[in-house]
Image (tube, rainbow, N blue to C red):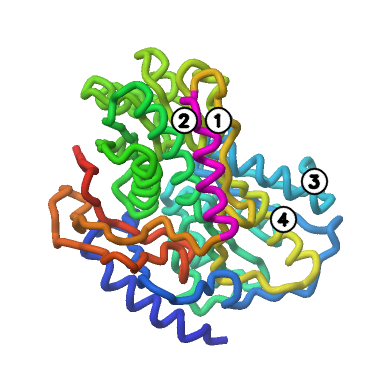
Amino acid sequence: MKKKLLALLLAASMVLALGACGNDSADGDANSPAPSGSTPAQTDSQGSGDTAGIPAADLKVGLVMIGEENDNGYNYNHMVGMEEAFAACGLDEDTQLVVKRNVGEDASCTTAIQECIEAGCQIIFCNSFGHEQFMIPLAQEYPDIQFCHATGYQAATTENTNDHNYFTKIFEARYLAGIAAGMKAKEIGNPKLGYVGAYPFAEVVSGFTAFYLGAKSVYPEVTMEVMYTNSWSSPTLEAQVAQALIDDGCGVISQHSDTTAPATTAEANGVFQVGYNADMISAAPKASLVSARVDWGVYYTFALNCMINGETIPDDWCQGYAQGAVYLSPLNEDIVAEGTAEAIEAAEEKFLNEDFHVFSGPLNGYAFDSNTGEKTEDWSLPEGEFYDESGTASAPSFCYIIDGITNIIQ
């Protein structure tokens, strides 16, 4: 069965996007810029993936993770989401869930997926960007099994009807978390923020730009320095990069990395931190202000119910703050700046009751080569226009460095 015309258009745009803000290797980010303006979101409706319906008691689920849940970060968040889905659907984790941990973005992913298949899984989830290239051939080989991949973009362009992508509008929660950072930076009189990034890919760039814009909305003087670990999860590298940012004068730092190392490093240096994926207050009670989080349970519950009810799983799924797919952990009331809760609540109203777009003009910046950090072309977004991030495809595609952000690629 052929997929919709959108798949062809998306495929063409991905090819054009390979030159800037992406590696030439298979692990690089190859997402293209989404159009600004009024293009309607189609990420919950296109595609195929019908099943005959499987009784809940007979459903078996595979979860392939890049790490393990004790990271108290990205993989922890996925496991929490799966537990939420199993509870909502009445499934038994002990007998109906097969988990493969610490699966690299390499041939070991093929092995892990095959082991899930051999265990009888009718639906398999993979949670890291580089897993997608190993998942797609197996989806073609096993058309009766549903394959779902977080952070990827290729499902809409394949001939398979049983592979799917999913992500969330985490940039909306990043924006709100940035407000907490901006309020604290203003309180301590230090406008320099720092950000520990994993890779210079669109997923990371989109997130830190939203974070910066949130901070700037309450403290216009802020600037931000970004450094990368070149790893999704490495406590040692995350601590080293966090320390470098702090040594360079950053008073509040944040992260797109999987562990609590930036939080504990911030606390050890007497500065403040905004987390990701998990409430990090317990790890750093004197530093961690709040965390931006994804509720993966929203998607996992949806997908498992599709299996049980014999309903279509979309090619591409993406939801945000208004749907409860992203949110903030509780504020650390002991250390957040006065007025933080009120400032966040005012911004929340924009997501809930207004047609608010995080990436709204005027914005100026540049596209860059993700290998060197060098500018490849100027970029600007005029006032009155917006970049429709995750509006037509779930995977983030915003990959420009805007004024006020210093991008350091080691």
Q: Nearer the viewer, residue 335 or 312?
A: 335
Specify which label sits upstream in the sequence, 1 or 2: 1
Q: Distance between the residues labelled 2 and 3?
A: 26 Å
Specify which label sits upstream in the sequence, 4 or 2: 2
Residue at figure coordinates x 52%, y 41% from the top left: 344
Residue at figure coordinates x 53%, y 86% from the top left: 2
Q: Residues within 10 Å of mark 3 (few under 14, many from 20)?
A: some
Label at residue 328: none
Specify the quadrant that holds the C terminus.
top left
Magenta span: predominant SS is helix
- The kind of residue on which mark 4 rests is Thr
Q: Is 279 situated left or right of 267 in this image?
A: right
Q: Distance between the residues labelled 1 and 2?
A: 6 Å
Q: Name the residue under label 1.
A: 72
Specify which label sits upstream in the sequence, 4 or 3: 3
- Secondary structure beneath dot 4 equals helix
- Secondary structure beneath dot 3 equals helix
| Residue 344 covered by magenta stretch | yes
Q: Is 402 situated left or right of 83 in this image?
A: left
The magenta-colored residue range is 336-353
Q: Name the residue under label 3.
A: 87
Q: Are marks 1 and 2 in contact (CB under 8 Å)?
A: yes
Percent x, y for residue 189?
30, 23
- Secondary structure beneath dot 1 equals loop
- The kind of residue on which mark 1 rests is Asn
Q: Mark 4 points at which residue?
A: 301
